[in-house]
Amino acid sequence: MEEYKYFRVTSNGPIATMTLNQPEKMNTLGYEPWMEIQKIQDDIEDNPEIRVLIINAEGPNFSAGIDLKELKSFDSKSVITNIPKIQRTYTRFQEMNAVVIAAVNGICYGAGFEMITACDIRLASADARFAIPEARFGLAPDMGGTQRLPRLIGPGQAKRLILACEEIDAREALQIGFIELVEEDYEGLQARAMKLAKRIANNPPWAVRFGKKAINAAADSSIAGGLLLEQIQTAFCCGTQDQDEAVAAFFEKRKPVFQDR
């Protein structure tokens, strides 16, 4: 895939990996990295063969959040101009067909924390630490944190983390439902993320796409609306060749071969 300044992007069949690649800067984020993420998302969405995206990081920390030097240049006008672009960047992880898995090690603060709230599945190593400290700097989270975090862990826990700026470790993040799995070390984390990605990629593509979209819709729609979506997606999937192949392979005791049809 194309080479980038702030990220290393690789692909292996249906699985792509986006690695934060500025460990000497603790993988801090800013306007240029966010715009680069948009280009990476374009590449992924232009390639229908990519069905899972793993987001991980080089070095001992996932991301220390926004580069605080950039805060000095912010004013109300620049925020109104740029924040919607950044919000759309993170939202796109939720909306893309590919399933997005975050594999977090070390510290994950602020803008990095908000980015992974938009991922479909979050894994962490035992040394991971999470915080959303914007209030400490006179700000409120503005990249989706106040909207996505309560949906993940409930409003009370979200208020505790956002208003008190409390840091939590991987064990507590798992306990309150912010992450799904904890692995002992970095190597185990990457292996577990890849294993999960392969399991997802081995399922029929349309079943995975509809499953992701229906679960996301559940956070914003009524039960009746969600059930209608389930009816529509099932009617569609039952007309696909891949669904016939999945059933045939099961009864023939062989590995299915899906064609995304």
Image: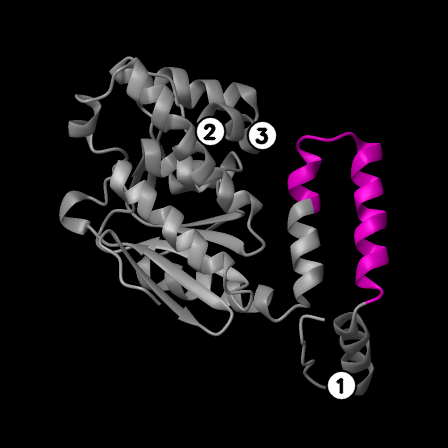
Which residue appears at 41% of the width and 39% of the height?
Answer: 115
Question: How many residues crowd around disc 1 within 10 Å: few (fewer than 14), some, or many (20 or more)?
Answer: few
Horizontal relation, residue 255 to residue 232: left or right: left
Which quadrant does the N terminus fall into?
A: bottom left
Q: Which secondary structure, mark 1?
A: loop
**Residue numbers of the magenta segment:** 214-239
Question: Can the viewer see residue 117 in this picture?
Answer: no
Contact check, label 1 and label 3, Cβ < 8 Å: no
Residue 144 numbered tag: 2
The residue at the point 44 percent across, 52 percent down is: 41
Q: Residues within 10 Å of mark 2 (few under 14, many from 20)?
A: some
Q: Nearer the viewer, residue 174 or 115?
A: 115
Percent from the top left, x then y, of residue 247? 81, 75
- In terms of secondary structure, where does tag 2 sit? loop
Q: Is residue 47 left or right of residue 136?
A: right
* Residue drawn at point x = 37 percent, y = 20 percent: 80
What residue does disc 1 label?
A: 253
Circles 2 and 3: CB distance less than 8 Å? no
- Pick whichever, 105 or 7, lies toward us: 7
Query: What's the residue type where badge 2 is placed?
Result: Gly
Q: Nearer the viewer, mark 2 or mark 3?
A: 2
- Quadrant that contains the C terminus: bottom right
Please say if 15 is above or below 20.
Answer: below
Give the vertical position of 21 relative to 76 (above or below): below
